[in-house]
Image (spheres, helix red, strand yellow):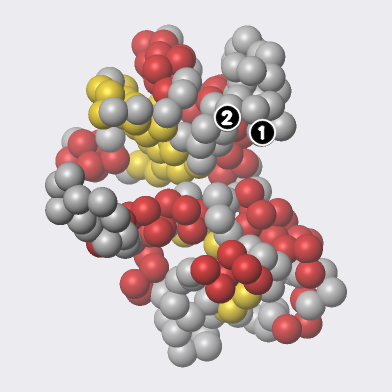
């Protein structure tokens, strides 16, 4: 674990690259939960990546970056690895809860629920490395389920915007014979959209990490704001 100004980054176990180098067949989930209940003041977003072995669902490792509560979550996962819990069992941990400290379903629980959904075939994912290979020739549907304003602020090239709240009313705009690759800001609305689509008979895949993660990886934020000479007034 390390601290850079007010940002904390932590890791436990092995990461995706190390697992693949060891010959393991791995999968992962990426999520961006709040450090405490969203309605309670002062909550900060953290980004978690939890790595597990396909088939066995053996918990292999995790990486977390955020501001508050990072150490607590990484220690819970480190303990779970030592106890040889399956990644799906993270959902069952009875962790302390009060709105100033966590949500009713702790971020560690949420990772476990996501992995459990994968194990049951409820959740199918697509990943950042897949983006450049997604066809833009109309053979698949690329769907962004954020609000219009969020979409206009930035989106992945080739993705059509249908806000999740309008999806049922606009379902006929999506061809049923084509797979649908879905994205939203954090992964929650796109998951809801996937469940709606599958209820209508579509084949749907949810982006692991959401547009927040995609934008953080693909954009150079150091170049977003104008630089000023040291000591010079703006």
Spatial distance from mark 2 to mark 1, Cα to Cα?
6 Å
Q: Farthest residue to the front: give it.
A: 233
Q: Quadrant of residue 48?
A: top left
Q: Quadrant of the C terminus?
A: bottom left
Identify the residue under disc 2: 43
Question: Which residue shows up at 20% across the image and 55% down it?
Answer: 228
Give coordinates of residue 175: x percent, y percent. Answer: 68, 83
Identify the residue under disc 1: 38
Mark nearer the N terminus (2 vs 1): 1
Give yes or no for contact between labels 2 and 1 (Cβ–Cβ under 8 Å): yes
Under circle 2, the secondary element is: loop
- Residue 37 vertical position relative to residue 173 in the rendered view, above or below: above
Binning the other alpha carbons within 10 Å of mark 2 as few (below 14), some (14 to 19) or many (20 upward) gives: many
Give coordinates of residue 211: x percent, y percent. Answer: 49, 58
- Residue 126 vertical position relative to residue 176 in the rendered view, above or below: above
Question: Which residue shows up at 79% across the image and 69% down it?
Answer: 166
Q: Quadrant of residue 80?
A: top left
């Amino acid at each position: 674990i390390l601290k850079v100004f007010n940002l904390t980054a932590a890791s436990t176990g092995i990461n995706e690259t190390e697992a693949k180098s060891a010959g393991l067949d791995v999968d992962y989930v990426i999520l961006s939960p709040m450090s405490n209940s969203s309605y309670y003041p002062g909550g900060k977003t953290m980004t978690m990546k939890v790595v597990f072995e396909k088939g066995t669902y053996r918990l292999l490792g995790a990486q977390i970056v955020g501001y508050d509560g990072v150490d607590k979550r990484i220690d819970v996962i480190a303990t779970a690895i030592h106890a040889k819990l399956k990644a799906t069992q993270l959902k069952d941990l009875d962790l302390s809860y009060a709105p100033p400290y966590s949500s009713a379903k702790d971020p560690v629980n949420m990772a476990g629920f996501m992995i459990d959904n994968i194990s049951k075939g409820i959740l199918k994912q697509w990943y950042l490395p897949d983006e450049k290979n997604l066809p833009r020739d109309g053979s698949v549907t690329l769907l962004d389920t954020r609000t219009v304003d969020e979409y206009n602020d930035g989106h992945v090239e080739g993705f059509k915007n249908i806000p999740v709240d309008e999806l049922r009313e606009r379902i006929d705009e999506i061809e049923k014979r084509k797979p649908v690759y879905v994205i939203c800001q954090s992964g929650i609305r796109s998951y809801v959209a996937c469940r709606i689509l599958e209820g209508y008979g579509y084949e749907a895949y949810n982006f692991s990490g959401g547009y927040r993660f995609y934008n953080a990886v693909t954009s150079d934020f150091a170049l977003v704001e104008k630089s000023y000479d040291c000591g010079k007034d703006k």
